[in-house]
Structure formats: C-alpha cells, structure tokens
Image (cartoon, grey):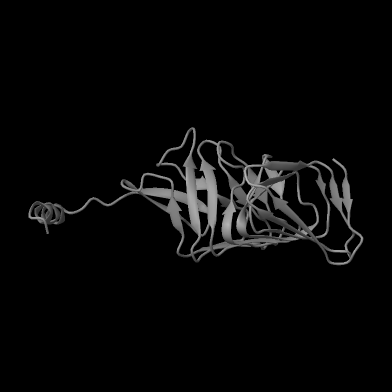
Amino acid sequence: AGTVTVTAVGYNLTLSTKASATTTFSGTISNNSTNLLYLVVNGSGTQALNGTNSFYGTTTVSGGTLSLGTNLTNNSAVTVNGGTLTSSASNINLGVGGVSMSSGSISPRGTGATGTFTLAANQNFTATGGTLSFNIGTALDQIKGSGTGSFGLSGTTTLDLTLGTGFAYTSTYQLFSGFSSGSVSGLTITGYDTANWLAALGTDGVLSFSAAPVPEPSTFALLTGAAFFGL
C-alpha cells in the first residue's frame, strides 16, 4: 500500500526484483503530465503492481517479471527487452502508447489462465525478438488494438503455445484482434504437435493449423533404404 508521487522532471524509478521472490505494491504511483516517470523493472524475481498506476511516462521490463493486476492508465510506451510482462487480471490496458518487445517474453495471463492485453486506439504492437506465450483453447489469450493501430512480428520472435481445455487442431484462434493491419515474418511457433501439424499466424492475427505433408512413397522408401545401409 501507500503512494509514490513523483514531482521531479524525468525521474527514473527502478524496481529491482529478487530471485524466487514476489514483491507486491498495491498503492498508487502517480505524477503529472510534465514530470515524466520512467519505470524500469529488472532482476530475476517478480514485481506485482496491483494499485493505481496513473503515472505519465514509460515502462521498461529489462529483467525479472512485471505482473500487472491493474491498468497502466497514462503510460506512454511499454518496452520489454529482457524480462517478462504478464498480468493477474482478465484484461489489462497498457496505457496510451505503443508496446514493443526485442527480447524477453510477453504472456497476457501466465500459464493456466487466459487474459487480454489491450492497447490504446491507433497504437502499434511490435515484436522483433523474444517470446509471446499464449494459452489457447475454448478460452484464449489475446492482444487487442483498435483504430489505425497495427501489429508486427519479425526477427527472432517465437510464439509459444499452451494447449488448453477445448483446443482442437481443426479450429482457428484470433490471437491479435482489432488492429487495422498486421505483418508476420520469420515467426517460430512452438508448443504443439509439430510432427503432424503445421501452424501459421496470418496477418489478420488468426492462428490456424494444417496437416503436415506426408512423404511420397518413393521418398519414404529411399529414406528407409538409406537408414538400412547406414547412409
């Protein structure tokens, strides 16, 4: 509990997390629109923010885990570059700016539950690396945008799936919704039966699966013969 009120201009608030420990702050972090606050989370533990996060400025997750129990009301940008961004609520608004990830991970709700990260209107979501962890099934994790906002996944970004209750390979899953456009390039998808299915995420944000191609009989025979002769 308590209140953190920033009056200095350009104040850096660094929350260093301890390994295997979760620290919870349920108070208020605030300032005004001219005294920007730069919130940085690092370390190797978990920092939970469950109070009123009404500060103006940016949030950067460089290490450890930032778990949001309430919205980032006036935050102008969220950057993940080494840590994990997650939440303990079914829906979290990520402020008024864009969201980007170059390393680390983003998990809208964590393992075993589903949730949504919502961007403000006309804001972009960009990942050039790191891991997007999504639970999918009858309920599923989502990242939502609106207006002219777009999403882009490229570089070394990985989409790691946890298959939950009601999951079916014949179904499709809207992981990114509300964005005006999307781009997907070089995305690696893990966490499913890669031997029998191929996963693809479309520029419309929809995840789908198709049956993996079966080798031609001649190809199968050639491979079998090569194995028999030790080639």
Residue 80 vs residue 41, the one in the foreground: 41
- The quarter of the picture where residue 83 lies is bottom right
Residue at 84% from the left image edge and 43% from the top image edge: 27
Residue 14 lies, in percent from the top left, at 76, 57
Q: Quadrant of residue 80?
A: bottom right
Asked if residue 108 lies left or right of residue 50, the reply is left
Place of residue 59 in the rendered image (x, y in percent of width and height, measured from the top left): 73, 58
Q: Is the N terminus in the top left, top right, bottom left or bottom right quadrant? A: top right
Q: Is residue 90 left or right of residue 111?
A: right
Q: In which quarter of the image is the C terminus?
A: bottom left
Task: Give the residue drawn at x 84%, y 50%.
Answer: 29
The image shows residue 41 at horizontal and vertical percentages of 70, 55
Drawn side of residue 171 relative to residue 75, left or right: left
Furthest toward the top, the residue is 165
Question: 100 or 217: which is nearer to us?
Answer: 100
In this view, which residue lies farthest toward the right? 7
Residue 210 higher or lower than 167, as above or below = below
Residue 69: tell me if it is visible: no
Residue at screen point 15% across, 52% down:
220
Asked whether residue 110 is in view, the answer is yes
Q: How many marks?
A: 0
Q: Position of residue 4 (x, y in %)?
A: 87, 51
Q: Which residue is drawn at 58% across and 44% down?
A: 141
Instruction: Examine the image and state in which quarter residue 230 appears.
Output: bottom left
Q: Nearer the viewer, residue 129 or 122?
A: 129
Relative to the observer, which residue lies in front, 24 or 31? 24
